[in-house]
Image (cartoon, helix red, strand yellow):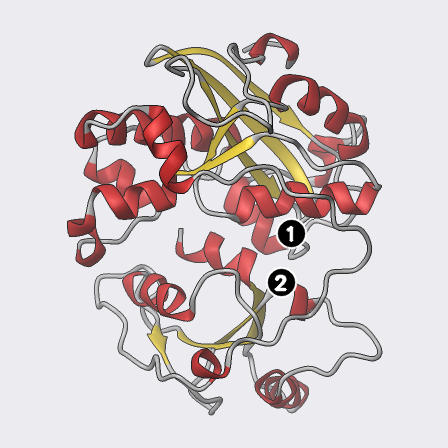
Amino acid sequence: MNSRVGILAVTPKLSNGEGWGMTRVTDFIALDVETANADVGSICSVGLVHFRAGQIFKSLSILVDPEGPFDPGNIAVHGIRPGDVIGKPTMAQVFPVLAQALNGTIVTHHSSFDRRALASAAARYGVAELECFWLDTLTVARRSWRELADAGGFGLANLTRAFQIEFRHHRAEEDARACGLIMLKALDDSGLDLQHWLDLVAHAPRPIVRGAPKVVVPPKSEAFARYAQPGERSGRLMGETVVFTGFLQMHRTEAAHLAVKAGCNVVDTVSGKVTVLVVGDQDLRLTRGNSKSRKHRKVEEMIAAGSSVRIVGETEFLQMVG
């Protein structure tokens, strides 16, 4: 394992003003982060794996002090505890190093979570977001292997099972490695090179958004759609009953699919059967001046009356079903 991030710098780099029509690009860095609590920006670990010409070249794992509490649920997922990050750098210290290594490079990640976590942490510390070219392997997987939609879905755990990739889930460096290997598999199976995938699905750098996140109301068509369906009997979360509320980064159809594959029953309304309320991360952190949804308020009343319903953010939900 390497002790320096700088060795991961990718060549060639791409500038914002350039298109993808240039010399063939074969290098990219796969990235994954883990968080300490329901705050999407509470990064406690960063994993980076540099792929060069179809092979793993360098890798690195960084423990980070999130300067906040660790939720037991998050600890259960990734195993990182408060004592593990004592004396470790904060994201304020890590960002300049990441920027030097990643700005102008192609960075693969699985789902939008990692990109959002880094953007949230950047806003928290008042630093510029990473100016790299984001390539989401979840989107790549959906386009490459449509048959997996009804065979476990496109989560990292299912893809690694399907492609016989061995790894320890929810370890940042391991997840990054698996993400990169899935990208290589997609390149082989699709016959497209990295530039073509960049043209199809890449996210270019976005301007920094400072201050508190804006609360976004989900479109009416999504808010009032029906998603109720029974969970798969083989899922490890069989017996849980999930209802969604607030704004999720993923479409609720996808969220319901992930819940069902994990064994959860999905319902549309709050009742005594509900065991988990999934709330959009930004809605979970609502402060004075913002109202919670009717579902959210009703579940809080149930909890106050002695119900054991859990309220989790989208981040924790993804960790539960991953």
For the point 65% across and 11% down, the residue is 6
What residue is shown with label 2? 281
What is the number of callouts on the image? Answer: 2
Left or right of 49: which side holds 122?
right
Disc 2 marks which amino acid? Asp
What residue is shown with label 1? 40
Looking at the rendered structure, the secondary structure element under dot 1 is: loop
For residue 238, the mark is none
Q: Is residue 88 visible?
A: no
Q: Quadrant of residue 226?
A: bottom left
Where is residue 258? Give x, y as percent: 35, 61
Q: Quadrant of residue 60?
A: top right
**Tags 1 and 2 touching, CB below 8 Å:** yes
Disc 1 marks which amino acid? Val
Q: CA distance from mark 1 to mark 2?
A: 7 Å
Say which label, 1 or 2, has the lower sequence index: 1
Where is residue 182? Give x, y as percent: 31, 31
Q: Is residue 304 above or below residue 139?
A: below
- Front position in the image: 27 or 55: 27
Q: Is residue 187 above or below residue 81?
A: above
Q: Is residue 64 above or below residue 220?
A: above
Where is residue 172? Give x, y as percent: 52, 32
For the point 34% across and 48% down, the residue is 155
